[in-house]
Image (cartoon, rainbow, N blue to C red):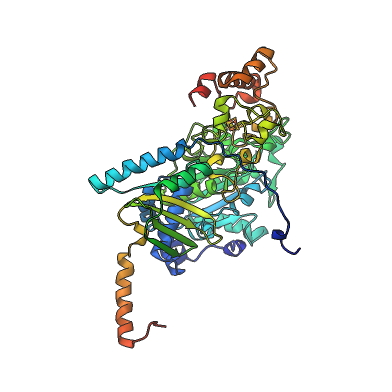
């Protein structure tokens, strides 16, 4: 269904100049339907619903920007996630609100025709097009470990980013290097922000949308924000939109009541697990992970890992892949505190936080790149 | 057994652990918004979908607000249901997509939700349409 929208050709000029509202109207969508779309978009953008009139006004006037989506060292999970987005008109958002001029997985064109489509879009919309990237970029041995049409990923990225308006890194691989970057990182994989810092590619406004994969409506929400307002949303120090990554999973977790009471499941099949107690001691990385899984949830709002009885693995944080075992119990310190801390964990929050901090501190290399969490931080939350 | 529905599934009882304070907080916010609407005529809206509420809190919230006498259904890009709660000026709007998934769940504090009002451009187009229909005495201009 989605492939039909992408021909790998340039869109007719009149189509590009049509606003989203005009296009929806032409398709028989009423003004009320349009307002409904805006309400869903506000929700997806994590904007207050009072912004709906502003969104409606903006979408009634913006025309479709050209988007080039580059896929490098990745598993296509981010695209899979996006195509399962459940906005009412995701096809409208992707195919009507933007002109997706290049996307390996979704486009019908292949080979030379596909590369020509990318080059034409770059030429015609110089300085205006948006670049979306999923996957990390291998830098070892001249970047030979991943090529497309004989062009190394770094060369294609350098060329494409040069005249882009902004770059959105979709997924933890593009944002932070991801699994290809895991030690010993044989391909020298790095994220897009790293390449900008290294001076390997032009520095452009960058939005990171990490997650392995990111939540579909977070991807569409960020694209929708750019489309609607023509600006990038407010970002944190890791270039993540604060509206989606401002809180930790722990901040919004429905098991938080048990955390606060010091009630922790000790194994996946004990009484505590059955009663829905906190998964902290089973390795939950919720306290150090910024994302909206606990509210937006997955699979069309069905649930999220913690609701299914598994701790958060921290997939939207840098180096989550090298930050110790997913089941390494943050509340079971192996360092200096030993038994004293273990006993204390059983009696409450402060001790849990203390051992978490100790465990986090222990993981020096990988942990150095993650956000530091102190006892005070956790206690304040 | 030809469909998935034919396979019996046993579910464990859902343990709802929240203490319900989320519903109380939202109700207080609605109280503040309604005061504001009455005093200043300013409307307010809360997106329930983005707030982490337990099933119990959801039930508590909607139990307290109750159901009023007016319900409207919109069929555009999936169904939407708009109803006034038993508290005048407090409306609930639930938007569904074509698959029936909730895509927005709003509590609107207003005299009439925007989505129910007729749009000026639509009315202007409709006026032309009406004139044509009067002339042809036909319900539809093909
Ligand atoms: S530690 Fe994990 S399961 Fe426990 S409250 Fe925090 S996020 Fe939820």
Residue A67: where, in percent of width, then height? 52, 53
Decide which of A75, A347 is in the foreground and name it: A347
Quadrant containing the N terminus of chain B is: bottom right
Left-right relation of B45 to B19: left
Is A311 drawn above or below residue B93 in the view shown?
above
Q: Residue furthest right?
A: B1
- Image quadrant of residue A113? bottom right
Left-right relation of B30 to B7: left
Decide which of A351, B1 is in the foreground and name it: B1
Residue A39 in view here: yes
Residue shown at 43%/53% (left/top)?
Answer: A39
Decide which of B137, A241 is in the foreground and name it: B137
Is A68 drawn above or below residue B24 in the view shown?
below
Quadrant containing the C terminus of chain B is: bottom left
Residue A363: where, in percent of width, then height? 66, 22
Residue A260: where, in percent of width, then height? 54, 26
Residue shown at 42%/50% (left/top)?
Answer: B106
Q: How many marks?
A: 0
Q: Residue furthest left?
A: B39
Is A210 drawn above or below residue A86 in the view shown?
above
Residue A371 in view here: no
Decide which of A302, A368 is in the foreground and name it: A302
Q: Quadrant of ligand 1?
A: top right
Residue B76: where, in percent of width, then height? 46, 65
């Amino acid at each position: 269904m989605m492939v039909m929208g992408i021909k790998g050709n340039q869109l007719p000029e009149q189509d590009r100049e049509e606003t989203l509202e005009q296009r929806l109207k032409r398709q028989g969508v009423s003004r009320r339907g349009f307002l409904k779309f805006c309400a869903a978009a506000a929700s997806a953008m994590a904007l207050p619903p009072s912004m709906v009139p502003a969104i409606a006004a903006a979408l009634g006037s913006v025309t479709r920007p050209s988007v080039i989506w580059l896929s490098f060292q990745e598993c296509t999970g981010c695209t899979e996630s996006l195509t399962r987005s459940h906005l009412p008109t995701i096809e409208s958002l992707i195919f009507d609100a933007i002109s997706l001029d290049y996307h390996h997985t979704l486009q019908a064109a292949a080979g030379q025709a596909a590369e020509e489509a990318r080059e034409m879009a770059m030429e015609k919309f110089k300085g205006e097009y948006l670049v979306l990237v999923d996957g990390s970029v291998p830098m070892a041995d001249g970047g030979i470990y991943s090529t497309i049409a004989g062009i190394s990923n770094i060369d294609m990225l350098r060329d494409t980013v040069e005249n882009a308006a902004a770059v959105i890194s979709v997924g933890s691989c593009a944002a932070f290097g991801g699994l290809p970057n895991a030690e010993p990182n044989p391909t020298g994989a790095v994220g897009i922000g790293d390449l900008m810092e290294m001076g390997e590619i032009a520095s452009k406004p960058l939005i990171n949308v990490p997650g392995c994969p990111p939540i579909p409506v977070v991807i569409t929400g960020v694209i929708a924000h750019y489309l609607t307002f023509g600006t990038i949303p407010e970002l944190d120090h890791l270039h993540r939109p604060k509206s989606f990554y401002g809180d930790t999973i722990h901040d919004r977790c429905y098991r938080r009541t048990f955390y606060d009471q010091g009630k922790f499941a000790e194994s996946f099949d004990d009484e505590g697990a059955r009663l829905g107690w906190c998964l902290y001691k089973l390795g939950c990385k919720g306290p150090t992970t910024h994302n909206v899984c606990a509210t937006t949830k997955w699979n069309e709002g069905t649930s999220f890992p913690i609701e299914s009885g598994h701790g958060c693995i921290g997939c939207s944080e840098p180096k989550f892949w090298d930050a110790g075992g997913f089941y390494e119990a943050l509340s079971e310190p192996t360092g200096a505190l030993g038994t004293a801390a273990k006993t204390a964990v059983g009696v409450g929050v402060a001790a849990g936080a203390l051992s978490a901090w100790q465990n986090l501190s222990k993981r020096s290399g990988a942990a150095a790149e993650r956000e530091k969490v102190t006892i005070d931080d956790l206690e304040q939350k | 057994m030809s469909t998935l529905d034919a396979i019996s599934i046993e579910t464990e009882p859902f343990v709802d652990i929240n203490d319900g304070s989320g519903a109380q907080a939202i109700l207080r916010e609605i109280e503040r918004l309604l005061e504001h609407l009455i005093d200043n005529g300013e409307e307010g809206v809360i997106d329930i979908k983005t707030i982490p509420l337990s099933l119990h809190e959801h039930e508590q919230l909607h139990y307290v607000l109750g159901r009023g006498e007016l319900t409207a259904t919109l069929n555009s890009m999936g169904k939407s249901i708009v109803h006034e709660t038993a508290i005048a000026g407090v409306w609930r709007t639930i938007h569904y997509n074509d698959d029936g998934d909730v895509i927005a769940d709003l509590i609107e504090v207003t005299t009439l939700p925007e989505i129910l009002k007729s749009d000026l451009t639509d009315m202007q187009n409709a006026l032309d349409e009406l004139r044509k229909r009067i002339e042809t005495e036909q319900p539809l201009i093909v």
